[in-house]
């Protein structure tokens, strides 16, 4: 539904699993496949590998709730040109689709550190769970709040709309039981969620 509302995006097919995704990509030859990684029968990693082996012109962007080192690395090694988490906003998705069709790679800022960690460690490590059920993107936003950035600055840093930042902040405050930004900053420092 979201994709159908994006300007310049035409949905040519949808698949229920990785086998179907690979088959539809062969038949329909889309510019970009937006791929979930966790699917029945054939997962998104294997489907990405099949699609990219058969046709290097079809670009794949992984869109998933999984932002651990192994998932990021496996998706990219399978041939994905982009990796977004499912809390990405519509503008982020539209921008990613546009960029990969122009040959660029797109990695969600929320998962970039996983990629760096995996590559510098020589082997993927399991991600440490964020406190109170915070998503990787919410942790990023909270860290930037603790660094003293405004909503506008956070939006620019994460390449999202300011309204998206406000939504993240509202969810963060609810999850951590904070009344305002000052309490959120205190929470971030207590839980080691600061960049400094």
Image (cartoon, grey):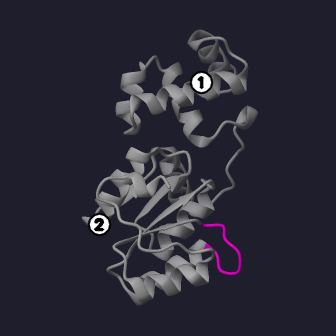
Crowding around mark 1 (Cα neighbors within 10 Å: few <14, some 14 to 19, many 20+) is some
Is 166 situated above or below 32?
above
For marks 2 and 1, give the CA distance: 34 Å
How far across and how far down the image is residue 176, in percent?
Answer: 71, 23
- Quadrant housing residue 160: top left
* Residue bearing the label numbered 1: 170
Is 175 situated above or below 86?
above
Region in magenta:
37-43
* Residue bearing the label numbered 2: 101
Work out whether residue 27 or residue 152 is closer to the camera in this orientation and state it.
Answer: 27
| Residue 38 magenta-highlighted | yes
Is 154 situated above or below 40?
above
- Answer yes or no: is residue 108 visible: yes
Of mark 2 and mark 1, the one earlier in the sequence is 2
Q: Is residue 164 left or right of residue 168?
A: left
| Residue 79 magenta-highlighted | no
- Quadrant housing residue 190: top right
Work out whether residue 194 or residue 51 is closer to the camera in this orientation and state it.
Answer: 51
Q: Identify the residue at horizontal 51%, vertical 21% (top origin).
A: 145
Q: Identify the residue at horizontal 59%, vertical 16% (top origin).
A: 185
How far across and how far down the image is residue 142, in percent?
Answer: 56, 27
Residue at the extreme left? 102
């Amino acid at each position: 539904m979201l994709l159908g509302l994006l300007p310049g995006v035409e949905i040519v097919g949808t698949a229920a699993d990785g086998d179907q995704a690979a088959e539809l990509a062969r038949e329909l030859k889309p510019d970009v496949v937006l791929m979930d990684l966790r699917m029945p029968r054939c997962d998104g990693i294997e489907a990405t590998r099949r699609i990219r082996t058969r046709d290097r012109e079809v670009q794949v962007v992984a869109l998933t709730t999984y932002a651990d080192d192994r998932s990021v690395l496996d998706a990219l090694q399978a041939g994905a040109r982009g990796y977004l988490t499912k809390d990405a906003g519509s503008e982020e998705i539209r921008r990613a689709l546009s960029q990969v069709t122009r040959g660029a790679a797109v990695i969600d800022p929320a998962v970039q550190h996983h990629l760096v960690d995996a590559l510098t460690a020589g082997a993927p490590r399991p991600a440490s769970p964020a406190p109170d059920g915070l998503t990787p993107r919410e942790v990023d936003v909270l860290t930037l709040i603790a660094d003293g950035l405004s909503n506008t600055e956070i939006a620019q840093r994460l390449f999202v709309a300011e309204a998206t930042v406000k939504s993240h902040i509202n969810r963060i405050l609810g999850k951590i039981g904070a009344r305002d930004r000052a309490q959120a900053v205190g929470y971030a420092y207590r839980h080691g969620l600061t960049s400094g």
